[in-house]
């Protein structure tokens, strides 16, 4: 059987009851993390401007833009929620493929769940199947595909979105083959966009297009038969590597979701260990910025290459400064998006500590490690070695960490009582009668 | 200046008055040809099923699906009209790049012209600028891009649609740069789809996405600066060849539209000379199928390779049979879509002549040539040499030919009086006060 058909058959026949409990729980964690990211960036100019461009053309306003009052049609909701959840580069990562798996898949099926009744059990199952689809096709063509210049979260996300939406639309096997084929005609997104608003739009575009592909297949719009492995398929055309075994082998036995990871801080992942260690020292010793004379960091060489901006002028530049990140995290006890406002970057206390923070690359320090020496004004010298940064595969964010991350992202957007309700809904997603309730609660007022 | 910015500046500053009259007339010919193709396939299952999938999600029903009564939002109209105009592979071709230039551009701006007032002069100008954009980027990366497996009408069409729509939206230079960048994030479509409904959907997807990109840029959604020439741009990522001079040189001096061509027959272009010659013999000698004993064709070798199906069982297979095509054209005095119905393929008179038609490859016969020997039942032997087939670059379809093609495509869909009105509107497009009238007249009832 062709790889496409093997995958399609799996997608339409797999039973929710056969998903291991740990994978289901990881799905709920990913959902909670994604909802927070979408709400957190919902007031960003990328979302406001895209909404301004499209709003007057909206169809039936059935769907929620997370964190916002406006309602739009399901395609626009998929686009906007996909975009907002990726705007701060704060969403989840499937380490093996470097795909951000939730951002293209969840907005597609959440929008669909506002159009037709979808139970939490089916929703979670469809989500896991969508993630499996994008990550398996990704594994078949990575890293060549990304190295060539493609933005894999966009190009592969559309297959995940089509698979997940197609499952909820109860496509038959042939229709699922077509849905994957039509998705392949929508696979797009290049890395030239990085640094512009078009980049976060990518998973939104993938979500909207994947949803469209599934709806078309449901009405028997005929797509190609060998969407994935065919000689002129997207996967073959857009990568110099193609390993079909990565797609077909072990379906239903291993789950990509089990390898998912979450960012505790809203900046490049290589500076996470330093932030993690500084926050620990801050809390263990009840430190304020004013207490600190100097910070010395022994880091992985990539930190120096990517994130050693000495004198950031804006919040965005601050994301590429390990010096700013440590100082801001000590001030705020976190390094969420708030640590990267222009105001924090200009804060004199932050600037003073930033100017007295120094980093040197050291052999033997891994990417998820750091060695910190902090000298206080009172003469004390504190040491901290972070062996595995929080958020790394070996030290995942706890459920409590994820809740705290979501709470920080919702601040000023959703009332606290609604935030707690949202957290409870995400943890209990598998038991929800109708998933639309999550969307309803995730907007400022219903 | 970067290639992207050079092109953007040209697109926003070029004046309609500086387009040569011959190019404007060619634009009107392309419009007329495109409108006919869109109407001709408007009842096809590809359109019906896609509409069935999307209709309930339509926004404001401002826009026309050519040839149909339903109205939809401008994005769906762009998608559906782009798809219908490419469904029968009967639309125009820019020979140098093998792009079908009208199908991605015209539906985008025609939909826009139903949303906001657009004069015929501005419409025609925007159309020409859009075609220039897609064909110039195409020239920079062809043939490697197509050979790799990309469907260039889709991938490059989105740039053309964005440019044309952006011009009508009066984007400034920076916004046009962004529009091209956002278009680059939407560039998609692979050749694996050929033979499925997803293939004709491609220019529709490009039209919808290009229109979306332009609307976003108008609201200052920020795209990349070097959308075309950047290291990770679509053009660089999706082709092993990149010749920036093909984009920037001679802007406003040469026009891609001047190299446009139109298909007289609804089948593979290599069998057009034989059809052309048979139709000429038919009319010169007032022949019926019953008069013919045998036809011998001396053809270019590609005919044998691509279109020598001996015993076609369906209309679609008939398109790949030079034998069927000649017989059907003698019966019908044309080889439009009607010549490729299942019924005509089964017609006993057609089958008899088809079975007595023979083709041999001959050196010295060019792709647009044929040498025909027709033996009649009364013993006469007729000869015909076609030096340049109608529709070829050296023997373009006349304005009258294009009118006849449109009339045939509209048969059974639009009343004759409306068809004549539509033809007059297309020829006079440059003087139209509001282009929306073309769309209005191109639907069965307004």
Image (cartoon, coloured by chain):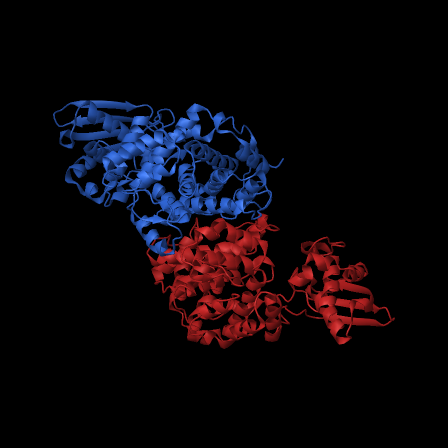
Chain colours: A red, B blue
Q: On screen, A426 above or below B32?
A: below
Q: Is residue A192 left or right of residue B444?
A: right
Quadrant of the rendering where the N terminus of chain A is positioned: bottom left
- In the image, farthest residue toward the right: A379
- In the image, farthest residue toward the left: B378
Q: How many marks?
A: 0
Given residues A1 and A420, the one toward you in this image is A420
Residue A135 rendering spot, x and y as whole percentages: 51, 61
The answer to whether residue B348 is seen in the rendering is yes
Q: On screen, A38 above or below B224?
A: below
The answer to whether residue A243 is seen in the rendering is no
Q: Is residue A264 left or right of residue B127?
A: right
Residue A3 rendering spot, x and y as whole percentages: 42, 59
Residue drawn at point x = 80 percent, y = 65 percent: A295
Given residues B103 and B162, the one toward you in this image is B162
Given residues A48 and B4, the one toward you in this image is A48
Residue A269 rendering spot, x and y as whole percentages: 65, 62
Residue drawn at point x = 27 percent, y = 39 percent: B337
Residue B299 rendering spot, x and y as whole percentages: 31, 30
Instruction: Locate residue B438: give its quadrant.
Output: top left
Q: Is residue A11 left or right of residue B287?
A: right
Q: On screen, A48 above or below A433?
A: above
Residue drawn at point x = 27 percent, y = 35 percent: B419
């Amino acid at each position: 059987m062709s790889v496409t058909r093997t995958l399609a058959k799996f997608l339409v026949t797999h039973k929710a009851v056969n998903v291991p409990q740990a994978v289901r729980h990881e799905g709920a964690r990913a959902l909670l993390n994604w909802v927070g990211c979408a709400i957190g960036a919902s007031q960003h100019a990328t979302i406001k401007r895209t909404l301004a461009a499209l709003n007057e053309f909206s169809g039936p306003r059935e769907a929620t833009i997370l964190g916002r009052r406006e309602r739009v049609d399901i395609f626009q909701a998929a686009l906007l929620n996909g975009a907002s959840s990726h705007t701060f580069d704060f969403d989840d990562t499937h380490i093996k493929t470097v795909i951000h798996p939730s951002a293209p898949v969840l907005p597609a099926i959440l929008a669909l769940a506002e159009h037709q009744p979808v139970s939490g059990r089916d929703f979670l199952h469809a989500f896991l199947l969508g993630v499996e689809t994008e990550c398996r096709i990704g594994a078949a063509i990575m890293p060549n595909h990304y190295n060539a210049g493609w933005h894999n979260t966009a190009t592969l996300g559309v297959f995940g979105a089509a698979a997940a939406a197609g499952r909820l639309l109860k496509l038959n096997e042939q229709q699922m083959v077509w849905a994957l084929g039509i998705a392949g005609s929508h696979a797009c997104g290049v890395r030239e966009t990085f640094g512009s608003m078009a980049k976060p739009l990518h998973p939104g575009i993938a979500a909207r297009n994947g949803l469209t592909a599934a709806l078309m297949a449901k009405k028997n719009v005929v797509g190609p038969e060998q969407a994935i492995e065919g000689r002129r398929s997207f996967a073959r055309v857009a990568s110099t590597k193609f390993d079909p075994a990565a797609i077909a082998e072990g379906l239903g036995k291993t789950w990509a979701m089990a390898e998912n990871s979450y960012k505790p801080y809203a900046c490049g992942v290589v500076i996470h260990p330093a932030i993690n260690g500084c926050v620990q020292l801050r809390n263990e010793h009840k430190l304020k910025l004013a207490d600190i004379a100097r910070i010395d960091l022994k880091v992985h060489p990539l930190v120096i290459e990517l994130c050693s901006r000495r004198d950031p002028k804006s919040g965005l530049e601050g994301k590429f400064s390990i010096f700013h990140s440590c100082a801001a995290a000590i001030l705020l006890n976190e390094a969420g998006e708030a640590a990267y406002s222009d105001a924090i970057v200009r804060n004199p206390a932050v600037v003073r500590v930033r100017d007295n923070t120094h980093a040197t690359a050291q052999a033997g320090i891994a990417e998820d490690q750091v060695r910190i020496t902090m000298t206080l004004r009172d003469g004390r010298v504190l040491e901290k070695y972070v062996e595995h940064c929080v958020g790394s595969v070996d030290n995942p964010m706890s459920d409590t960490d994820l809740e705290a991350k979501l709470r920080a992202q919702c601040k000023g957007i959703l009332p606290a009582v609604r935030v707690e309700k949202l957290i409870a809904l995400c943890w209990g997603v598998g038991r929800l009668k109708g998933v639309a309730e999550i969307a309803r609660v995730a907007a400022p007022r219903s």
